[in-house]
Image: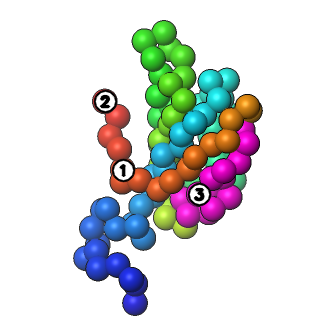
Amino acid sequence: MSNYDCNESSSCPSQLKSLYIGNLDPRVSEGILIQMLSGFGKITRSILAKDYRGESRGFAFVEFESTHSAEQAVEHMNGRLIGQKIIYVERTPKVDEG
């Protein structure tokens, strides 16, 4: 039995398939991000936040097909040095583009 009483809520930690990735080096493209994370499982969607000039705002959202893949990505990627910055990775409720 889980420590959470979520009743299959989409915000239940065991249900979260999406990740927030922060403190990204501006040189990290969406393609590089997908390449780094695809080893943990199938990525169903990714969004790299960009400013009005099309340059990275330093954060992204990535959605995996399974919660296990998201868990593994957080465990292995949070706190890693990517480019010139140590990235922050956490699970988050699904975020709609827009």
Q: Pointer 1: residues within 10 angstroms few (<14), some, or many (20+)?
A: some
Q: Is residue 51 magenta?
A: no
Q: CA distance from mark 2 to mark 1?
A: 13 Å
Quarter of the image where the C terminus is located = top left
Question: Circle 1 — which element?
Answer: loop
Q: Which residue is mark 2?
A: 98
At label 3, the amino acid type is Val
Q: CA distance from mark 3 to mark 2?
A: 24 Å
Number of the label disc, if any, that sits on residue 13? none
Q: CA distance from mark 1 to mark 3?
A: 15 Å
Image coords of residue 23 (percent x, y): 58, 36
Residue 38 visible in rendering:
no
Toward the viewer: 43 or 26?
A: 26
Number of the label disc, if any, that sits on residue 74? 3
Question: Circle 3 — which element?
Answer: helix
Q: Which residue is mark 1?
A: 94
Question: Circle 2 — which element?
Answer: loop
Mark before the other along the chain sequence, 1 or 3: 3
Quarter of the image where the N terminus is located = bottom left
| Comparing labels 1 and 3, the label whose residue is closer to the camera | 3
Q: Magenta span covers which residues? A: 70-82
- List the single residue furthest toward the bottom: 1
Q: Relative to residue 71, is residue 30 depicted above or below?
A: above
Mark before the other along the chain sequence, 3 or 2: 3
